[in-house]
Each structure stands twice: as C-alpha cells, then as structure tokens.
C-alpha cells in the first residue's frame, strides 16, 4: 500500500472490543510506535507501557476521564 492510500484510509477508533491482541500484533504495534517521529528527535525520553490487566486499564481510564472533565456520572432516574 502506498503512503497516500494509507493516509486516506486511516481512522480514529474510540471503541474497542476488549479482545486482547496477540503477541505478534503487540510486537507489530510497538515496532510501528517506536518508528514514529518524535518531537525534536528526543528518542531517549520515550517510554512505552503496555497495560494488559483490565482492572488497571479501567483505573487509568477513570483517572484520565476525571483529569479531562469527562467523568462518568451515575445515572439519575427522573419521574415526570
């Protein structure tokens, strides 16, 4: 696939299936991530972390949602 075709076909994914990736998929993703450009060439400061535990990922998600003002609020039932 040429570069322009790849750029035009890319998409942003906001929902995930929850199915774990295989070791080969993880290796391919990390290889692509490490090959990505870094601001001002500061490759020595790059740290990649792979989170595999669903409960830890949920904690990280909740902390990020709180940090960015997108906390999941408890549902309220209203009677009209």
Image (tube, helix red, strand yellow):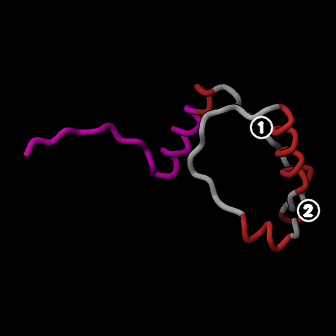
- Taking the view exactly as shown, the residue that stands out farthest to the bottom is 4
Question: Which residue bears the numbered disc 2?
Answer: 41
- Based on the picture, tell me whether residue 66 belongs to the magenta stretch: yes
Pair 1/2: label in front? 1
Task: Report the residue at 61% width, 27% height from top.
Answer: 54
Q: Which mark is residue 49?
A: 1
Residue 52 placement (x, y as % from top left): 70, 29
Residue 50 placement (x, y as % from top left): 76, 35
Task: Report the residue at 86% width, 51% height from top.
Answer: 32
Give the spatial CA distance, label 1 vs label 2: 20 Å
- Taking the view exactly as shown, the residue that stands out farthest to the front is 1
Task: From the viewer's side, name the closer residue of 40 and 24.
Answer: 24
Give the mark nearer the N terminus: 1 vs 2. 2
Residue 9 placement (x, y as % from top left): 72, 66
> Magenta stretch?
58-80
- Based on the picture, tell me whether residue 69 belongs to the magenta stretch: yes
Is residue 11 shown left or right of residue 58?
right
Helix, strand or loop under label 2: helix
Task: From the viewer's side, name the closer residue of 70 and 8.
Answer: 8
Helix, strand or loop under label 1: loop
Q: Which mark is residue 72?
A: none
Task: From the viewer's side, name the closer residue of 21 and 68.
Answer: 21
Above or below, 4 against 48 in this view is: below
Q: Residues within 10 Å of mark 2 (few under 14, many from 20)?
A: few
Quarter in which the N terminus is drawn: bottom right
Task: From the viewer's side, name the closer residue of 31 and 24.
Answer: 24
């Amino acid at each position: 696939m040429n570069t322009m075709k790849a750029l035009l076909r890319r998409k942003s994914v906001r929902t995930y299936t929850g199915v774990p990736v295989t070791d080969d998929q993880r290796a391919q993703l990390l290889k692509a991530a490490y090959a990505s450009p870094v601001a001002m060439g500061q490759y020595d400061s790059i740290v990649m972390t792979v989170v595999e535990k669903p409960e830890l990922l949920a904690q990280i998600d909740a902390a990020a949602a709180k940090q960015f003002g997108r906390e999941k609020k408890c549902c309220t039932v209203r009677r009209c």
